[in-house]
Image (tube, helix red, strand yellow):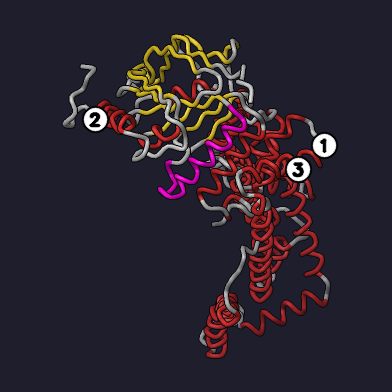
Amino acid sequence: MAVSDRARPTARFAQMLSAGAAAGLPLVSFAFILGIWSAVGLSGVVNEAIFPAPWSVWSATVEMWQNGTLQKDLAKSLGRAGTGFAIGATLGVVLGLLTGRVALVRTLLNPFLNLLRPIPAIALVPVAIVWFGIGEGSKYFVVSYTVFLTVWFNTHHGMEYVPDIYMRASRSLGASRLREFVTVVLPAAAPHIFAGIRLGVALAFLSLVAAELSGASSGIGFRLQEARQYVRTDRMFSLLIILGILGAVTDLIVHRIGKKLVHWEQG
Amino acid sequence: MTEPQTGRVEIDDLVIRFKGKQGPVTALERTRHVLEPGTFTALIGPSGCGKSTLMNAIAGFVTPAEGQVRLDGQTITGPSSDVGVIFQQYALFPWFTALSNVRYGLKQFGLSKREEIDRARAALAEVGLEAHADKYPQQLSGGMKQRVAIARTFAVGPKVLLMDEPFGALDAQTRLIMHDLLLDIWRKHRATVLFVTHDVDEALLLADHVQVMSHAPGRLIRHYPLTQPRPRALSRSGNELLEIREEILGLLHPKSTHADPLI
């Protein structure tokens, strides 16, 4: 949102330059690490089968792409993460609004939900497999459960920190409770809800891979596990890097959307 | 202009207590008072004396431990648009533009969208902000924010207007401008005003009645009716205002050179 930008053209150009440099800065870091990695590969001091060089990882990536498994696995994993996230985030927001707003629901559920929060997603995988089998159900369950708890927790706290003065202003302006909820309580809690959703996106990937590592027949996590059986460290590295890029890009997208939607939050 | 018939606030043996760590704490001692329709009362007292508590009770934000507050004979049980409130921290909704902030209060009347926008624009024009209707509160100065808040509150036509140190966060120059603006709008709308402040000069410049409160737990200890025509200035309104000023300062700081006439 541009607030009457009075910067002179030269100053603006300097600004753009420094912004461009700031955006390019991570590339310096990547190039630096890639350089060291290549040097290690060229020196031949480490066993290529244990620690593959960058070019081996690249050719493993091309290989997986050409035989089509990479696209299939990506689609499978993204579908699972997306579905699980959608279920978990929806439930999390709805229940967070309820526990934040309705004392009875809060009394009944909060202590229990807080007890569930420290349980790691991986610990749930065995239960999920018994309940939902080795197919899609168990993946959806693990992902949505993890996302749900985080999104619920943040939504609930966002609701708790709705400033009292907004409620007072709203009520002395004669607003109905419904309008107050939709146009005051929700926007006031929105920054917290979005923080929860952003965390939820990151956790969706983490918990999905945990679920795919044991008891799956497709997906990035499964392919990692399979690569272990054939001692294909080049494939493992490739898959790990893809997971990293995927997580970073989705986080960036979610962050951008959040900034647009809660535009009033930044100073 | 006809004298308003509505907006009579009766504070009837009101006592406010809060839960403290060692049992209930009295924030407001038994208070009995009437604000006549269309009057402008300034409430002044030391910090923490219960000025805001009394205001919050009239706004319906806190429940009385004893007694009650009535507006035109009806007991106040909670906030309503009959009692408008202006907060020191403005309390504008940052996700709405200035215009949407004003429209928020107008929604209850079920106007057509056209009419709602027209009325909101008129209210902003009244405080001189028609050119800033589409700005967000973060893009406005403190004085402009408080203008939006005043426009938002007057737009719903409250019978009573409560102001809790509304200009306390503004610089001296802006504060003077806001005084003139407030008196202008009040003359047009004629709500019963209760204005909480800790600034004696502000109270003397604005009010028909100045009520002085004691240290906590608060009670009203002194009343000064002021009949000097507005706009007032402390230097040219004669010695009377300056004498009252000295007296009030003496009441607020009894340990200074002034003798406390109440002890």
Q: How many marks?
A: 3
Q: Residues within 10 Å of mark 3 (few under 14, many from 20)?
A: some
Viewer-proximal residue among B77 and B212: B212
Q: Amino acid at mark 2?
A: His
Magenta-highlighted residues: B168-190
Can residue B61 be seen by looking at this rendering?
A: yes
Secondary element type, mark 1: loop
Viewer-proximal residue among A216 and A260: A260
Q: Quadrant of residue B217?
A: top left
Q: Calculate the distance from the C-alpha at mark 3 to the C-alpha at mark 1.
A: 9 Å
Viewer-proximal residue among A8 and B19: A8
Residues behind callouts 2 and 3 on a single chain: yes
Eyeballing the image, is A150 above or below A104?
A: below
Can residue A30 be seen by looking at this rendering?
A: no
Q: Calculate the distance from the C-alpha at mark 2 to the C-alpha at mark 1.
A: 54 Å
Is-magenta flag for residue A136? no
Reading the image, the residue beneath label 2 is B253
Q: Quadrant of the C terminus of chain A?
A: bottom right
Which of the marked residues, 2 or 1, is nearer the chain's N terminus?
1
Q: Amino acid at mark 3?
A: Ile
Secondary element type, mark 3: helix
Give me the disc on residue B112. 1
Q: Amino acid at mark 1?
A: Ser
